[in-house]
Image (cartoon, grey):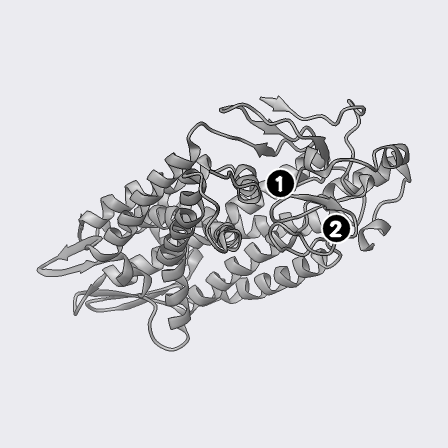
Amino acid sequence: MKDSVTTDSQLDLDKVIVCPQCDAVFQLVRPQHGERAKCQRCHKVLIAPRRNAGLHIIAVALSVLFLIIGAAIFPFLTIDAAGSKNAVSILDAALAFSGGPMIILSLATAALIILFPLFRVLLTLYVLVPVVLDRPPARHAIRAFRLSEAMRPWSMAEIFAIGCAVALVKVADLAHVGFGPAFWMFGILVVLVIAQDSFMCKWSVWNSLEHPKRS
Amino acid sequence: MVCMELSGTPKKIVSARDLGIVACSRCSKAWPLGTQTCARCGHALVSRDPMSLQRVWAYWVMGLICYVPANLFPMLQTRTLFQVDESTIIGGAVELAHHGNLGIAAIIIFASVVIPLGKFWAVAFLALSVKNRSMVSKNMRQFLYEVVEYIGRWSMIDIFVVAILSSLVQLKALAAINPGTAAMFFALSVIFTMLSAQAFDSRLIWDVQAKDKSAGDGGAEINE
């Protein structure tokens, strides 16, 4: 192994790709659209470019943006038992923990199910729109993309959706529960958020931020 | 599918550190070993994070400390016409099972007991396995790490259920559900275990194995 260090010390670092997960080094081979380059050692997907991925992500991101705003405002679930009625929006649900230290939990929930997904969409649009239009990257695009990637594990819209299903079963025998428009919006939203994450090839985004096309 | 190879070394896979390369752990750009910060994304470059395991254990302990009160205190306070019920996580699931909702009870037990406990075990196992030689193959451990990272967020489901229930079921005199103290601790526990898993540097899994083959004694190298 030592030999390769000395002989390859003049390695061109732009022609090399390192697996972020297991630190294995490979010579960079750019896969065709629809193909995936995987690490041979730990099988992590390193590059997965897709044709028009940028446009798809932007389209999805725009619809996610409107759905989040809609889902947060419109009534989400309505409950009806023996004449008493109650309609809640997602914001109400997020802010359910009130009083004393529980207010922190309220803020955290609101962040996890609305603010983080919303910020991620805005940052994605900010980063990708100039790249797709073949313009130089927006100011602080790198910082924006960094932030958006850091928020990825903390944006929990899809988990909230499953939580809804569990909650519905819990109250189903207690009262009649109806779905507001926001419920369906949120359902579509979850599918779109997952689609957006699977379209995105991190390597390609970093690469295009580093080497912007000059038009 | 395209597989990548470093020409000249068709069979043997080489670590970046052995080639004098350090890869940015955020944007994966390669730099010569010794470079301080990544010029592309501004992240500090470390070939192996020496503080990684310490942070893993610190968050792990915090998570475990928060997990105990999360199970002892009531998660939900249900007030109906004549009585007030306070149920803990496990108590609530048992009650659901008594009412015949076995599926939902199973989901709750799985998301708030099996997953958190499994995560504590898995993270501890991974952190110990890079210090000592492990019988479990590196691919298995890598897989375990990916599962832990992916599944950890799903424990939050219980918090969301409590949030939905306690905002929805507010029917004045008839019935009301309010969150209990456990919700706070449970959320903290999930957050700390997520941080613990994120702090783990998965490259360490592959180092010990490489060291085992060449020198025979793993562990010492990690603290470099």
Q: Residue at x 36, y 51 (%)?
A: A160
Dot 1 crowding, Cα within 10 Å, few <14, some 14–19, many 20+: some
Q: Nearer the viewer, residue A159 or A63?
A: A63
Q: Where is residue A167? Give x, y as percent.
A: 30, 51
Residue highlighted by disc 2: B48
Q: Residue at x 39, y 38 (%)?
A: A57
Asked whether residue A39 appears in the rendered view, the answer is yes
Tell me which amino acid carries mark 1.
Answer: Leu
Q: Residue furthest bottom?
A: A100
Q: Can you tell which of label 1 and label 2 is closer to the viewer? A: 2
Q: Nearer the viewer, residue A96 or A203?
A: A203
- Looking at the image, is A110 positioned above or below residue B106? below
Q: Quadrant of residue A42?
A: top right
Q: Nearer the viewer, residue B113 or A24?
A: A24
Q: Label 1 is found on which chain of the structure?
A: B
Q: Quadrant of residue A25?
A: top right
**In the picture, which quadrant includes the C terminus of chain B?**
bottom right
Whether the residues at callouts 1 and 2 have beta carbons within 8 Å, the answer is: no
In terms of sequence position, does the residue under pointer 1 or pointer 2 come before the other? 2
Image check: A44 left or right of A11?
left
- Looking at the image, is A102 positioned above or below residue B40? below
Q: Label 2 is found on which chain of the structure?
A: B
Q: Nearer the viewer, residue B41 or B208?
A: B41
Q: Residue furthest left?
A: A83
Q: Which type of secondary structure does the marked residue at label 1 adopt?
A: helix
Residue highlighted by disc 1: B144
**In the picture, which quadrant includes the N terminus of chain B?**
top right
Q: Which type of secondary structure does the marked residue at label 2 adopt?
A: loop
- Looking at the image, is B114 positioned above or below residue B172? above
Give me the disc on residue B200. Answer: none
Number of numbered tags placed on the structure image? 2
